[in-house]
Image (spheres, rainbow, N blue to C red):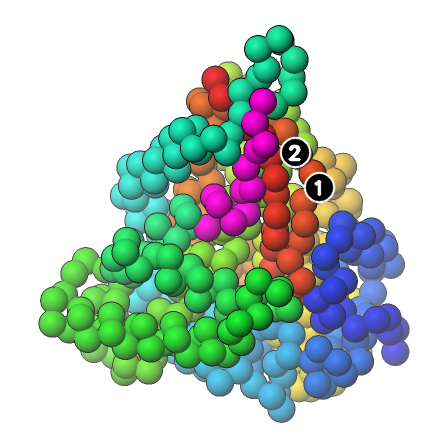
């Protein structure tokens, strides 16, 4: 077996060295075995764009129904497997998509654009008024005049949380609570979230949605919870589990994409004036930043038969992991993969996955980032990094722990 250190070890992803590791794996274009560790049964990993696409393709001999993250496999399945949208297949998966998709569609994103813009302008105004921002120094220097702002904790989660809470009918007064719970659910080995285990966070999210369901039974709204109740085809447990899925999916990865926008603008100062001069570049910038940031780090599948992937024979019932950030920097598909290029066309990135489980909330996430970039182009002259980003100790997402910046307002 081709083995290296356990790739499920979250400590591997706390530095930018992971990009060199992934670059090597993509160049070798083979599957790599991780022995039992983070996953009790071990797992294979694939890295190239071709192999990751093959693993996730429709009709591939792999399934998501045992779970989609490292640690799950056929012998240790996710308890929500077969019930939750992202961990289901076949007729049930199709039924869930039909029920949930209208709330996460392009049409829904368009309907929410004014709401998103209001949230973004409010956030930016708070930053401008709050002293955690900066202006060019009066002597003409480019040095920031303020200590700066930490984006990951102060900004990253606010827009995604507002949007997903709006969809689920969660009142603004509860946003802070649900953001805290979703952060704990994906907290990994982060000291900040050590006060609550991920399993306990999920339990509390489900308990919270019990109250939401009862409230919507008594007072129907125009939200997803009301729609799932009205459909009459799901029991309460199924509604709870899928609301948990939408809440975490809508907040956890998108918040790191939002933070990544500021990182991208700091590393690429030419982006803001380009977007200001030609706003039609914003959709291209969104796709390229999604590729460059790749907030979802991995997805897992389990083989349904003996098969071969990336030249490796895989037995039935074995877990295989696709590393999406590695695929999104495959130089065979993306020349100059470490650079953000506003002329990159086509951009077949896998930031939202691929195949039947392509992220159902992709249109919403794209809309959120497009609104954010448009407003940043209108209000900022530039973004300066005040220190290198710090990364979370997790293997599920490329999570920013800290991104300290200075913002130069127009």
Q: Is residue 137 left or right of residue 207?
A: right
Residue at x 48%, y 45% (from the top left corner): 154
- For label 1, the residue is 388
- Magenta stretch: give its range: 145-157
Residue at x 34%, y 46% (from the top left corner): 109
Q: Is residue 137 left or right of residue 369?
A: right
The residue carrying pointer 2 sits among few (fewer than 14), some (14 to 19) or many (20 or more) residues within 10 Å by Cα, namely some
Which of the pair 60/78 is nearer the observer? 78
In terms of secondary structure, where does tag 1 sit? loop
Task: Name which quarter of the figure residue 119 lies in.
Answer: top left
Q: Is residue 182 above or below residue 267?
A: below
Question: Where residue 23 appears, x then y in whole percent?
Answer: 81, 52
Question: Which quadrant of the figure contains the N terminus?
Answer: bottom right
Task: Name which quarter of the figure residue 51 lies in.
Answer: bottom right
- For label 2, the residue is 385
| Residue 345 in sight here | no
Q: Is residue 211 above or below residue 162?
A: below
Residue at x 65%, y 17% (from the top left corner): 142
């Amino acid at each position: 077996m081709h083995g290296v250190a356990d790739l499920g070890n979250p400590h591997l992803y706390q530095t930018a060295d992971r990009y060199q590791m992934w670059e090597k794996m993509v160049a070798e274009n083979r599957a790599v075995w991780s022995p039992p560790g983070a996953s009790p049964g071990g797992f294979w990993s694939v890295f190239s764009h071709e192999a990751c696409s093959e693993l996730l393709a429709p009709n591939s001999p792999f399934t998501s129904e045992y779970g989609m993250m490292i640690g799950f496999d056929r012998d240790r399945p996710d308890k929500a497997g077969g019930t939750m949208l992202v961990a289901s297949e076949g007729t049930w998966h199709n039924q869930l998509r039909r029920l949930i998709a209208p709330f996460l569609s392009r049409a829904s994103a368009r309907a929410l654009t004014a709401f998103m813009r209001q949230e973004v302008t409010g956030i930016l105004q708070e930053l401008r008024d709050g002293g955690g921002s900066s202006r060019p120094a009066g002597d003409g220097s480019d040095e920031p005049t303020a200590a700066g702002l930490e984006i990951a904790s102060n900004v990253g989660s606010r827009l995604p949380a507002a949007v997903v809470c709006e969809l689920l009918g969660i009142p603004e007064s509860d946003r802070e609570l649900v953001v805290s719970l979703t952060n704990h659910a994906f907290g990994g080995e982060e000291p900040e979230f050590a006060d609550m285990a991920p399993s306990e966070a999920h339990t509390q999210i489900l308990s919270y949605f019990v109250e939401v369901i009862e409230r919507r039974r008594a007072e129907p709204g125009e939200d997803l919870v009301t729609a799932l109740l009205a459909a009459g085809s799901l029991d309460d447990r199924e509604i709870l589990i899928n609301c948990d899925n939408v809440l975490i999916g809508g907040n956890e990865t998108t918040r790191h994409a939002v933070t990544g926008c500021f990182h991208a603008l700091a590393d690429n100062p030419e982006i803001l004036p380009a977007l200001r001069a030609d706003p039609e570049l914003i959709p291209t910038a969104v796709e390229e930043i999604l590729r460059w940031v790749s907030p979802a780090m991995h997805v897992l599948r389990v083989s349904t038969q003996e098969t071969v992937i990336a030249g490796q024979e895989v037995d039935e019932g074995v877990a295989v992991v696709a590393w999406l950030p590695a695929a999104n920097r495959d130089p065979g598909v993306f020349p100059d993969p470490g650079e953000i290029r506003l002329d990159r066309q086509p951009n077949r990135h896998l930031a939202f996955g691929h195949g039947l489980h392509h992220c159902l909330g992709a249109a919403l996430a794209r809309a959120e980032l497009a609104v954010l970039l448009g407003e940043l182009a209108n209000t900022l002259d530039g973004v300066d990094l005040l220190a290198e980003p710090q990364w979370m100790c997790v293997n599920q997402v490329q999570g920013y722990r800290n991104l300290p910046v200075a913002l130069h307002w127009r």
